[in-house]
Amino acid sequence: MTLSNHAHLTHYINGQWTPGHGTKTSNNVNPANTTQVLGTAALGTTQDLDDAVAAAKAAFPSWRAVPAPKRGAIIKKAGLLLEERMDAFSRALSLEQGKLVAESRGEIQRAINVLDFIAGEGRRLNGETVPSELPNTFTYTARAPLGVVGVVTPWNFPVAIPVWKIAPALLCGNAVVFKPASLTPWTASLIMQLFHDAGLPKGVLNLVFGGGSTVGQRLVTHPDVVALSFTGSNEVGTRLYADAAPMLKKVQCEMGGKNPVIVLEDADLDLAAVGTVQGAFGSTGQRCTATSRAIVVDAVADAFVERVVHHAKAIKVGDPFKEGVLMGPAVDEGQFQTNLRYVAIGKEEGARLVYGGERPSDAEFQNGYFMTPAVFDHVKPGSRLAQEEVFGPVLSIIRVKDWDAAVEVANGVKFGLTSSVYTNNVSKVFQYADRIETGMLHVNSPTVGGEAHLPFGGAKATGVGQREMGKTAVDFFSEWRTVYVDYTGQKRVGNLY
Ligand code: NAP
Ligand code: MG
């Protein structure tokens, strides 16, 4: 592998690229042009996973002994290297995942920001000192690493998500085994190279390619892996959570969303429409934070829908490297078929397709997973289209009579990742902040985005375990020690309790 291309990608175990024990490989395909095979990746076996865990376990004692600011310095170096490699990373990301180059650069910038922030946490990995009830006693708390932790990630943010898990895990002194999404092996390898070049000692970070049900499952149930940080679907996350429970592993799962935008009668409708379209169709709707429901009060619904359709029509679909293109392809055949299926479901359920949802007929689109952005109006709150995560460029507009109905509909799904309200009424803004059941809330801006130094994650069925990013990231990857030091120097007099 180089920064500009890859032939065959292998596992990264104990500081070395290794073919492992498997004989099978997977093709890494460009979703904008499926005739372009970028290269292949090894498909690992459970033996490869065991080797990676063994390497991590062996590396852990000396890594945890490295002072936290020194661990932070390696993470800082990785961030500086990533800045230098921005062009190469973004090109690889757009080629194997299909997002626009500008979107890739945005994702990589997020990873740089995370590395920048987490590196500094090495100098702030603090506990508390508090007075003891007893004389001549010093009590304090300190953070300790967990051990070998497993990181399992999806294909939609294949740079930022692994980095926002791996960086705090390493900073806290853990050793990591990383199982990336099968669809995005190149960027996963580039991340390993980044930490390698930043000077991370061998064995501290390991990567094994392979299927979720084989290598992934082994990581989940391996007795030496004490914690799991997962981002992906509810289906896989629920199973992972259940499988890890009998082994009493610490688990963090960030899963699906069905993120609403509420548009009230006093909203700036132009702003609301642009924000909704950006949130719904940016990154081809393949963001966990994508806007999938616009809940609009009747009074402004017609005017809002007209504006949304106007902006959706302006979205030029096509190759992510082409000038003027605003939306790339679905990531693979499976996701593409899911998108088309939900368009059909919406029609069957009686929602009104007011724009898009079609595969463009021109020859240039036939080798990629392209669909025009779909806008449905008059979607019923209880319908499948309004309840289930699509993870593609499909927006459901739900009309409601007033604010209370809007809140009820917004909260009437199992998910709770992110949301937004468009209003200029300050009372409604704070009522929204009190009443909406999501982990992240936006006012007069799209549902998407998140900053490196702020917690990221969802409520209800979207998330279990601590929030990611921000200072809370270290809460998951460390555990508290409570220390009592008795400096009386002799047997205490009286009752200890
Ligand atoms: P996915 O199908 O759940 O896969 C996620 C990861 O789990 C992949 O690495 C997958 O490996 C692995 N996996 C599959 N089966 C496994 C098993 N039995 N044991 C252990 N690992 C297993 O999700 P996806 O399709 O990649 O990503 C889309 C989903 O991610 C959406 O639901 C989206 O909402 C969610 N997401 C959530 C957030 C958030 O922060 N809340 C952020 C981004 C994405 P393979 O690739 O080999 O199948
Ligand atoms: Mg999947």
Image (cartoon, helix red, strand yellow):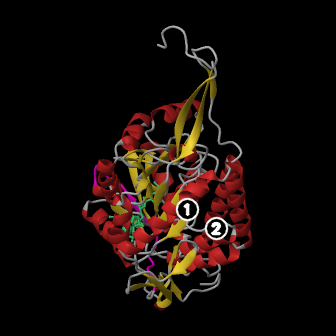
User: Toward the viewer: 284 or 197?
Assistant: 197
The answer to whether residue 415 is above or below residue 54 is above
Task: Give the residue type at disc 2.
Answer: Phe
- Quadrant of residue 197 within the rendered picture: bottom right
Expressed as whole percent of the image width and height from the top left, the position of residue 58 reads: 51, 62
Expressed as whole percent of the image width and height from the top left, the position of residue 163 reads: 58, 61
Residue underneath mark 1: 59
The answer to whether residue 252 is above or below residue 407 is below
The answer to whether residue 382 is above or below residue 235 is above
Expressed as whole percent of the image width and height from the top left, the position of residue 260 reads: 45, 49
The answer to whether residue 134 is above or below residue 99 is above
Residue underneath mark 2: 195
Instruction: Name the secondary structure under disc 1.
Output: helix
Q: Is residue 337 left or right of residue 291?
A: left
State which region is magenta: 368-383
Question: Which residue is rendered at x = 43% and y = 88% of the image?
Answer: 366
Q: Within the magenta stretch, is there residue 267?
A: no
User: Toward the viewer: 484 or 285?
Assistant: 484
Farthest residue toward the front?
490
Farthest residue toward the top?
494
